Image: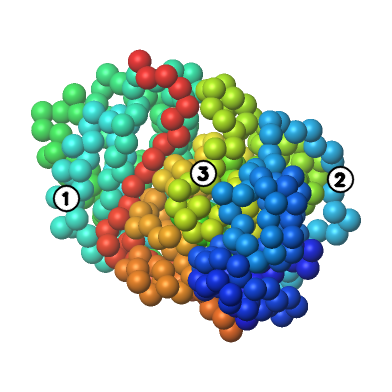
Amino acid sequence: MQIIRINDIDNVAVCIEKAEPGAELTSHDVSVTATEEIPAGHKIALCDIRKGEGIIKYGFPIGIAREDIKKGQWVHVHNVKTGLNGQLEYTYSPKDEKTALSTEKKATFMGFKRPDGKVGVRNQIWIIPTVGCVNGIVRALERQARALVGGTVDDVVAFTHPYGCSQLGDDQNNTRKALADLISHPNAGGVLVVGLGCENSSIETIMPYVDNIDNDRVKYIKAQDCGDELEEGMKLIEELIDHAKSFERVPCDASGLIVGLKCGGSDGFSGITANPLVGRFSDLLTAQGGTTILTEVPEMFGAETLLMERAVDRDVFDRTVSLINNFKEYFESAGQPIYENPSPGNKAGGITTLEDKSLGCTQKSGTSPVCGVMEYGDRVQNKGLNLLSAPGNDLVAATALACAGAQIVLFTTGRGTPFACPVPTMKIASNHDLAKNKSNWIDFDAGPIVMDKTIDEMGQTLFDSVMDIAGGKKVKSELAGYAEIAIFKKGVTL
């Protein structure tokens, strides 16, 4: 097999390897002769396609032919344009059957049970600044405090950001919610909140946003009120470490696991291997009573109806419509095009239009019902598959998943990236070459799906790997010491 035809009605297929002119390419049910060089992961026309006709992939239109395309030609940005345009109206038409996996064997992992009922997969000390002015202080505290790590305490991590002051309205509220979400996160066995003292988002302002404040777990320092903020900060961190050391890993039911689903640097294989594999994981976890969260709203455009028809009820459908249309209004209010996507790296990897990208991206949601829809900064309330309002930007979206309560983020990629958000960020390669060449970044290789493995075979393997990570196995970015946050900026700066 040299090409993959994803759906029987597709008029394009994906080349597994680079095709040379004259090469005879075959799949299980179709064959075609390449008329020009076509890169791996890119599309080849399976029949003549006239100008103005739809390009069909995944069984859905991914764009419109700019010109006549002959059978065997390369199909990409030079001869295809998006078919998306403006906001749409949607009709509530749920599927008669919402498929979901069932399971008899209950899965467990070794996690940290918190007094408030939440479960952590790490037992770290987090240092969180209320305002960017104290970033230097929290970094200095991080460097000093790491010498104290031991026992069941995994690490001390400071999360710097440039916000917390000179913000207004919803933009300022987003920052407060995001910081409060991190303070409440169960992966932190202890949290030191560091304020300056004169900022808009002060300690006193942020704390009402925090759930179930435990004064043994959360400590505060206001730099302007201290003689030596580093000395005072270290005293508090020592107290937090002593508290966090009281927690031990114990067996935890998989139903307590919340996993964020994210893709970045996607390529032409992402929608064939890594993303549907993560979709299978999502179905397996939700069948265990666990929770998954899909975000990147702009990368739902063009595939949103596939999510809407899986809404568990009319209310979730209406909220999904608002999720999509509100994000389109966000683009329009800034005077920017709604469909300025995919990125240069996506195009180099074989993704042609936003529809192409979105139909691949939403595969991460699997087939389970959509049970909840969240605004940015909300914490997940519903078991099962949830949708979260956040942009496609890797750092911002992954941070939003952590803020929503995800203890782990699964990050699929065809191009590779080293970054990590506040929680373990598992990198899943869409192709074997990436997994081989960037083994210091990649945690799981989904590439064999185009060779000799099926999604069914690899789905359980991925599930077991995630359970191992939940139980303490470090991902590559953790071993490298990478962890950062990026808060969604949605307003003016004073």
In this rendering, the label closer to the viewer, 2 or 1: 2
In this rendering, the label closer to the viewer, 3 or 1: 3
Name the colouring of the figure: rainbow
Q: Along the line of sight, which residue is nearer the eye, 123 or 83?
A: 83
- Residue ID at (57%, 27%): 330
Residue 350's place in the image compared with 455, above or below, is above
Q: Position of residue 117 (x, y in %)?
A: 53, 53
465 left or right of 280 in image: left
Decide: few, some or many residues near mark 1? Use Cα within 10 Å; few <14, some 14-19, many ≥20.
Answer: few
Residue 126's place in the image compared with 209, above or below, is below
Amino acid carrying mark 2 in the image: Ser
Q: Earlier in the sequence, mark 3 or mark 1?
A: 1
Contact, CB < 8 Å: mark 3 with mark 1?
no
Rounded to the nearest whole Å, what is the CA distance between mark 3 and mark 1?
A: 32 Å
In the rendered image, the quadrant that contains the N terminus is bottom right
Q: Earlier in the sequence, mark 3 or mark 2?
A: 2
Rounded to the nearest whole Å, what is the CA distance between mark 2 and mark 1?
A: 55 Å
Q: Secondary structure at mark 1?
A: helix
Amino acid carrying mark 3 in the image: Gly
Decide: few, some or many residues near mark 2? Use Cα within 10 Å; few <14, some 14-19, many ≥20.
Answer: few
Amino acid carrying mark 1 in the image: Arg
Residue on which the image places disc 2:
93
Q: Position of residue 127 (x, y in %)?
A: 29, 43
Q: Position of residue 132 (x, y in %)?
A: 28, 31
Residue on which the image places disc 1:
143
Residue on which the image places disc 3:
392
Q: Secondary structure at mark 2?
A: loop
Q: Secondary structure at mark 3?
A: loop
Residue 116 - label: none
Rounded to the nearest whole Å, what is the CA distance between mark 3 and mark 2?
A: 27 Å
